[in-house]
Image (cartoon, rainbow, N blue to C red):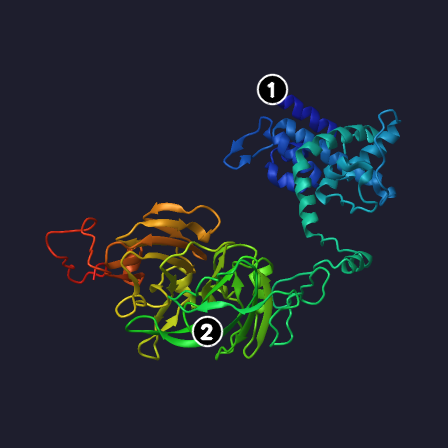
Amino acid sequence: MRRSRNVTLLATALGSSAKSASLLALPAAPLAAALPAGWRGLAASSAADGGEFGSGGPRWLTWRGGALLLAGGAAGAALGLAMAPTAGMPPLANNSSSSGGNRGSASAAMAAATPFERLQGSSRPSSPPQPQPSVAAAALPAPAGGEGVRPQAAAVAAAAGQGGREQAERREAAAAAERPAQQPSPEQVQELEEQGETEAGYGEEAIIRLPGEGPNPFTHPDPGQDRDAAGLPLLACGKSQAPAVPPPTGRAWPAHLVADITTTTADLPVSPLHKYTFWTFDGKVPGPLLRARVGDVLELRHTNRDRDGVGHNIDFHAVTGPGGGAPVTYAEEGETKVATFKLLHPGLFIYHCAAAPVPTHISNGMYGLLLVEPEGGLPPVDKEFYVLQSEIYATESSETKGMLEYSYVDGLDEKPRKVVFNGAEGALQGRTPLVADQNDRVRIYFGNAGPNLISSFHVIGSVFDKVYREGDLLSPPARCIQTTLVPAGGSAVVEFDCPVPGNYTLLDHSIFRMEKGAIGFLKVRPRGGDRRRDIYDSVDPPVPCPGCKLHP
């Protein structure tokens, strides 16, 4: 009864009970959608006050929400007419002590402003966009009272501001995101250039200006000179192909090392049955192991001899600076690029081609290791080896028998056809195992080029006495490790002793990868007559199981 009486009174005040009743029966969403944004928050808040709820929220306006909605719409229409003579004028401050006419003007200005603008006050822009009155809102019947509606409109607008504030703030945030970033003035740009600030990009249009550009302190224009401009002695960088390792630097002082690397294309065996067209550093997979000392300057001379005309560069994980040197070593076919890098950190580091698409260049064989000795070098050992694990993503060639072709799709799916040591299945087997002698201490510089898998590097028949994890040559090594994890793009240095002669198996202990080629051997030759039966002995002689790949 109370609801009916209130509805009747509301209809009488508006002069059309039939129209009011029909509006109250309408769903809330269509009615509110026709109103300005400021009133829609009010409609939602009113509908939630005792309305009927469904799975999507409030569905029908209550009598109270309908009353506020109709009053607010009528107020908006009246205010739109009242503001017409002052279109484009900034809103007036709302002064509670002003006359009714002033209160009406202030209320109209408040209704015209968005909730965010009402919060900003006088700090808002001098010429903000003015919201246009909704056609549907102007069509609602105006309540009686003339000027008396304006204070009511102010109260309704204040209530609507609470409901619509979040929406207004979201609109403001979206508009701010679309505005272009503020650019420095010409005077600021000139000042930065005078100070030698860096302007850098990465890619085909890279521009790199280094602070205080001047002559390279490590230049040596005369090929016959023995020192560079900084006084460092010029030496050839230690370099070797896997599994060999260059000898220790043996230096207690820094030097300027020169390394020439050539990128070429080569068809190389990837298994006893297949070949693969590799992109290579110096014609082999993996690329050479470079050896230097912390504090050395590495001068890289990169020449591109790729027969297919593909551009290449080199990203050294040991280099401090943009791209690890890739942007300044990029060379097209027939070009030579020269760059110098000071080696600030000791360790064992991957290097690889970083030309686009990077996964393709790495998958095709463009990787190697750079060893940077710490001050004082590494403890001496009897044998050092270079082993690098990688994956090959390929399918059978439809044109050439015995050839594999690169598969980008298999790379995306991380489903390698081969997982190998030193570029090929069988590279460390048969006639080409690693070789040491009984009682030797062995050090393996192990890298994982990936590009996708983590290696679980293990040597069957030995325990790693020392493991320099992640290629870290400064921290104390881990001791007595059975298997060490080496991430893609990472490395490790392991050491162990060989007191018992025989064959030791290197493998990725993610054991199914053994079937894809991630297996090799270290042959330890006997020395002297002591076979160390106190460590390893049996009643019967060893008998390898038929077809066993682990224990030949």
Q: Is residue 13 left or right of residue 292?
A: right
Tell me which residue sits at (77%, 55%) in the image.
Answer: 184
529 over 282 or under it: above or below: above
Q: Nearer the viewer, residue 127 or 261?
A: 261
Q: Which of the 4 quarters of the picture holds residue 258?
A: bottom right
Tell me which residue sits at (73%, 37%) in the image.
Answer: 115
Q: Is residue 299 left or right of residue 13?
A: left
Q: Is residue 319 left or right of residue 476?
A: right
Circles 2 and 1: CB atoms closer than 8 Å: no
Tell me which residue sits at (66%, 68%) in the image.
Answer: 229
Q: Nearer the viewer, residue 222 or 55?
A: 222
Q: Which of the 4 quarters of the picture holds residue 459?
A: bottom left
Is residue 467 among the parts visible in the rendering?
yes
Distance Cα–Cα, label 2 vs label 1: 95 Å
Q: Nearer the viewer, residue 501 or 528?
A: 528
Say whether disc 2 or disc 1 marks the residue closer to the N-terminus.
Answer: 1
Residue 265 placed where, x, y %?
A: 45, 76
Residue 416 placed where, x, y %?
A: 36, 62
Mark 2 falls on what kind of element?
loop
Mark 1 falls on what kind of element?
loop
What residue is disc 1 on? 1
Amino acid type, mark 2? Asp
Q: Residues within 10 Å of mark 1 (few under 14, many from 20)?
A: few
What residue is disc 2 on? 282
Is residue 15 among the parts visible in the rendering?
no
Q: State the count of labels.
A: 2
Between disc 2 and disc 1, the foreground one is 2
Tell me which residue sits at (49%, 57%) in the image.
Answer: 373
Image quadrant where one finds the N terminus: top right
